[in-house]
Image: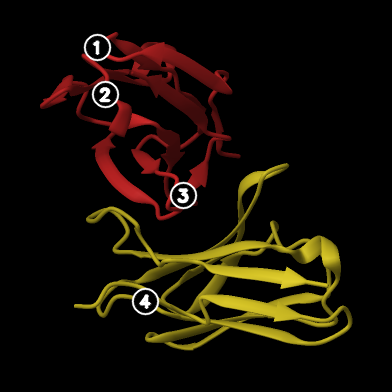
Chain colours: A red, B yellow
Amino acid sequence: AQKVTQAQTEISVVEKEDVTLDCVYETRDTTYYLFWYKQPPSGELVFLIRRNSFDEQNEISGRYSWNFQKSTSSFNFTITASQVVDSAVYFCALSDLLVFGTGTRLLVSP
Amino acid sequence: DAGVIQSPRHEVTEMGQEVTLRCKPISGHNSLFWYRQTMMRGLELLIYFNNNVPIDDSGMPEDRFSAKMPNASFSTLKIQPSEPRDSAVYFCASIIQGISEAFFGQGTRLTVV
């Protein structure tokens, strides 16, 4: 069975703070993909990153970075110098069933 | 490509009525997912099709829910009879397994009164 756990229900930070969103997954598959999606208040689901299980290199995209550690089955997401526009619910997901975690609501205040 | 297209965007219906939600996946994508999102339960996977065949429907809440994918370009999710607790946003997503990210439709907001 596949499972994704996002233990942080809600995080509140002040603008310019760094924040890390945790994601822990369970799967018996040896090949799998992990995803992060953002859901802003408008409701759509916005793709952020896809990572396959064979690629453990960390990835950085602007203020966003991801840390994939197979040894701990974690795929954490860090936003550096957060901005108000980062306020959203962030979901971690696992293929092939594309199972989602419960999401972490990030509130960034000015 | 216009992306994943869902219709209708909003649906208000009375308890007991049949509701049909529609989804057109992105051309060439081989897998399709239906999700239900509520405040209480988050984003729940209802059913997953691969090459038009239902692979996992363990998330379908009960017999009132059914989903079909008659061809690669169309899928429906039907609720009959509908109940107030079915009120939620229903998302459809399509993907090329192992190659692409999942693309989501805009969702259908269903309200059952």
Query: Is label 1 on the same chain as label 4?
Result: no
Disc 1 to disc 4: CB gap under 8 Å: no
Mark 4 → mark 3, Cα distance in angstroms: 16 Å
The label nearer to you, 1 versus 4, is 1
Q: Are marks 2 and 1 in contact (CB under 8 Å)?
A: yes
Residue sitting farthest toward the front: A110
Subunit of label 1: A
Q: Mark 2 sits on what residue?
A: A83
Q: CA distance from mark 1 to mark 3?
A: 32 Å
Of residues B16 and A110, the one drawn nearer to the viewer in this rendering: A110
Question: Which residue does the numbered mark 3 point to in the structure image?
Answer: A98
Which residue lies at the image location 41% right of the left edge and 76% below the top edge? B51
Say left or right for B103 vs B1: right
Q: Picture coordinates of residue B45 (x, y %)?
A: 59, 54
Q: Residue at x 26, y 40 (%)?
A: A48
Q: Nearer the viewer, mark 2 or mark 3?
A: 2
- C-alpha gap between disc 2 and disc 3: 29 Å
Front in this rendered view, residue B51 or B88: B88
Amino acid beneath label 2: Gln
Please tell me which residue is depicted at 85% across the width and 81% down the height of the picture: B81
Mark 4 vs 3: CB contact within 8 A: no
On screen, B85 above or below B27? Answer: above
Residue B60 in the figure: left or right of residue A21: right
- Amino acid marked by disc 3: Leu
List the residue tagged with mark 4. B25
Q: Which residue is mark 1?
A: A16
